[in-house]
Amino acid sequence: MPRPLLVMKFGGTSVGSASAIRGAADLVARRADTHRLAVVVSAMSRVTDLILSTLEAAERGDAALVDEGIGRLRSTHEAACRALVPPGRASRVLDQIEGILDRLARVARGMLLLRERPPRAVDDAAPTGERLSALLLAETLRESGIPAANVAGSALIVTDATVGGAKPFLEETAENCGAVLGPLLAEGSVPVITGYGAAARDGTPTTLGRGGSDFSAAIIAASLQADELWIWTDVDGILSCDPRIAPEARLLREVTYNEAAELAYNGAKVLHPRTLAPLADRRIPVRIRNSFRPAGPGTRITGRHTERPGVRAITSLSQVALVSIEATGLSLYGAQLMARALAVAARAQVEVLLMTRSSFRQNFCMLVRSGDVEPVVEGLREDLAIELAHGYMLPIAVDHSVGLLAAVGEGMRGTPGLAGRLFTALSERNVNIIAIAQGSSELTIAIVVNATDLRTSVSAIHSECGLGRPASTPAAH
Ligand code: ADP
Ligand code: ASP
Ligand code: MG
């Protein structure tokens, strides 16, 4: 019997400093005797933001800021390297760091020259942080006597060509994982794989979207038919609310794939929204754990539903906007307008988070992420150009001053009076409800409120549902 196969993913904070990288290596080392291990890493915390803002500076022609950005990346990673790798071996690793930064610098120089930021070039440069952190973790593992090999996610994960958030092809990815990772695992070496980055069939670099290293790890765990995936992060697991909004949020020891997926989709940053799909299909259990408090049990995500039905957690999304279209009279057929608007969103590959429609005034609203507003509005203007030009429709309206909150839990529909309680809790705090959706899933009630009311609403509902910890229990961070 081969040893069980465990995929471990380390998030940005969990590799965010030399001591965190050493801690991550220890967590890997602890399982090295009992498991076959594959590791997926994020960039050190804030590094991806710095890379993307450096490329924006390049597009603006700001050479000084580009130099500063690359300089900061160099000093952060060089300092970590010197702290982790003994002097005799450090110079070779420092050269590799320089090589990785050189690739970024070449992309940035091209952008400076052209005053353009081609999305393909951004996708090529964006996972630079992962290349650097994978290098450092693999070196640290070797220093502690664990054979480790640095592997690029782009050599494994095959995607379509969508810019900024590509869709993986699991079969081809599984073939690559078998070919590249199989021999490493068989010889007892730990592959340390860069998260976030992937490649299209023709080799063009792609990414899996911001926060996409979770998704990388899930794709790799699914491809390898791993026995389990552990996601190491900076909180004790999935909590009943974002602890930055409700510090009394409680650890959820077990959630279902469905609950975790709804939470992630509705804004719980602890998991990238697409992470669970490949795992749920294959029933691969996931654990979310705190790399800084590894003794904790974490959250286990499985297909079983063991908890009492009802609300388990509250999430929110602030970077959203309501896009509304409205006919001026009754001459346009409402269902057709809706169909056309949704077709526009589908063509632009934009996710509609929630929609509402009033049946008499032919008004239709779609809630979308702020970054998706432009393609949707452009598409609508194009598609409805004639109706808009002839005054059959009001100009397309966009309201950015809204936020979405969601209450999530299996079997919520079986909790009578729940929606009423949530609305009362909001109205007691003078929160105006702009839109609601329960949908046919029993899992989520979503509510749109004014952005300024979002935090109050989330904590009001969190406490109305009795989800917080008693005041004396220790904090989750
Ligand atoms: P990583 O870099 O490890 O991927 P992220 O910053 O992407 O970490 O995700 C972890 C963060 O998610 C936590 O620090 C926390 O602030 C935030 N978060 C939001 N909602 C939740 C929730 N319901 N449970 C746990 N963490 C949450
Ligand atoms: N480093 C990438 C990001 O910051 C991916 C990740 O952390 O998951 O978006
Ligand atoms: Mg993350």
Image (spheres, grey):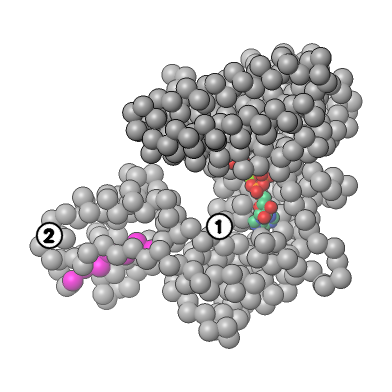
Q: Tell me what residue is drawn at x 36 percent, y 54 percent.
A: 373
Q: Which of 12 and 339 lies nearest the eye of the viewer?
A: 12
In the rendered image, the vertical position of residue 230 relative to residue 142, given as above or below? below
Viewer-proximal residue, 121 or 196?
Answer: 121
Above or below for 51 versus 467: above
| Disc number for residue 100 | none
Q: Residue furthest front?
A: 64
Which quadrant of the structure image shows residue 229? top right
Coordinates of residue 424 in the picture (x, y in percent): 57, 83
Relative to residue 257, is residue 173 depicted above or below?
above
Task: State the quadrant of the N terminus.
Answer: top right
Residue that mark 2 sits on: 389
Q: Secondary structure at mark 2?
A: helix
What residue is disc 1 on? 266
Query: Magenta region, mostly helix, strand or loop?
Result: strand
Considering every residue shown, the one lying at the far left of the view is: 390
Q: Position of residue 398 (x, y in %)?
A: 33, 63
| Circles 1, 2 touching at the beta carbon (< 8 Å) | no
Quarter placement of the C terminus: bottom right
- Magenta part of the protein: which range? 322-328
Which residue is at the front of the view, 377 or 438? 377
The reply to whether residue 320 is visible in this rendering is: yes
Residue 325 located within the stretch drawn in magenta: yes
Look at 72% across and 59% down and name the residue there: 239
Question: Is 89 left or right of 217, judged from the image as shown?
Answer: right
Q: Residue at 43% across / 19% down in the picture?
A: 202
**Circle 2: is it few (<14), some (14-19), or many (20+) Cα within 10 Å?**
few
**First in sequence: mark 1 vs mark 2:** 1
Which amino acid type is shown beneath numbered disc 2?
Ala
- Give x and y (percent) for residue 162: 42, 34
Type of amino acid under label 1: Asn
**Side of 103 relative to 23 (left or right):** left
